[in-house]
Amino acid sequence: MVNILIERTAPLSLDEAWRRLTEWQRHGEVVPLTRVRVLTPPPTHEGTRFVARSGLGFLSVDDPMEVTVWHPPSDGEPGLCRLEKRGRVVRGWAEIEVRPGPGGRTRVLWREELRVRPLPALADPLLGATARYVFGRAANRLLRRP
């Protein structure tokens, strides 16, 4: 099991940072070799389900997720979204939080607990480094793109 924390600040309002980070299809646009398919009708709410499919051909892995906490930012108060990863291969959870940051910026916290079956615990350092790189780069791209 791997736990990661990605922290960013962005010159965006809480609402705009939230929008950019929680439009699930956008994740497929910024993560290489990944497509995202939302399974429930909009808007996003507790119970929204989607699948991120990453890889090429038979080397692809599905990462089905469900939104279990959905508290968008409101009146300057932080926003929090929690996703439960419900796949056979990828398990764990992810949280995306936006809160007021320094100098009128928005502070973003992206936390994940990640387990990939059948990888042994010996692979956790490599999995953690890869996840930090991929999710950190995704956060950067999502926050930069309107």
Image: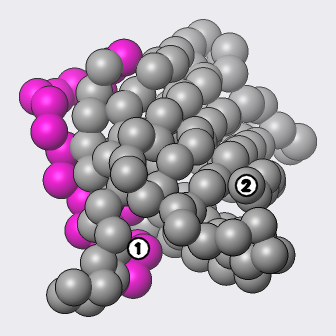
Is residue 128 rendered to the left or right of residue 117? Answer: right
How is the model colour-coded?
A: one colour
Q: Nearer the viewer, mark 2 or mark 1?
A: 2
Give the secondary structure at mark 1: helix
Residue depicted at 75% across the width and 58% down the height: 2
Residue 76: x and y in percent read 67, 17
Image quarter in which the C terminus is found: bottom left
What type is the residue that disc 2 sits on? Met
What type is the residue that disc 1 sits on? Val
The residue beneath circle 2 is: 1
Is residue 27 visible to us here? yes
The residue beneath circle 1 is: 30
Is residue 72 rendered to the left or right of residue 122? Answer: left
Magenta region, residue range = 24-46
Q: Is residue 74 magenta?
A: no
Foreground of the two, 46 or 146:
46
Q: Is residue 48 above or below residue 13?
A: above
Residue 10: x and y in percent read 69, 54
Q: Is residue 74 above or below residue 15?
A: above
Which of the two discs, 2 and 1, labels the residue nearer the N terminus? 2
Foreground of the two, 143 or 121:
121
Count neighbours of disc 2 (C-alpha within 10 A) and say few if under 14, some if 14 to 19, many if 20 or more: some
Give the secondary structure at mark 2: loop
Residue 18: x and y in percent read 51, 38
Is residue 66 rendered to the left or right of residue 50? Answer: right
Which quarter of the figure has residue 35?
bottom left
Residue depicted at 63% across the width and 54% down the height: 114
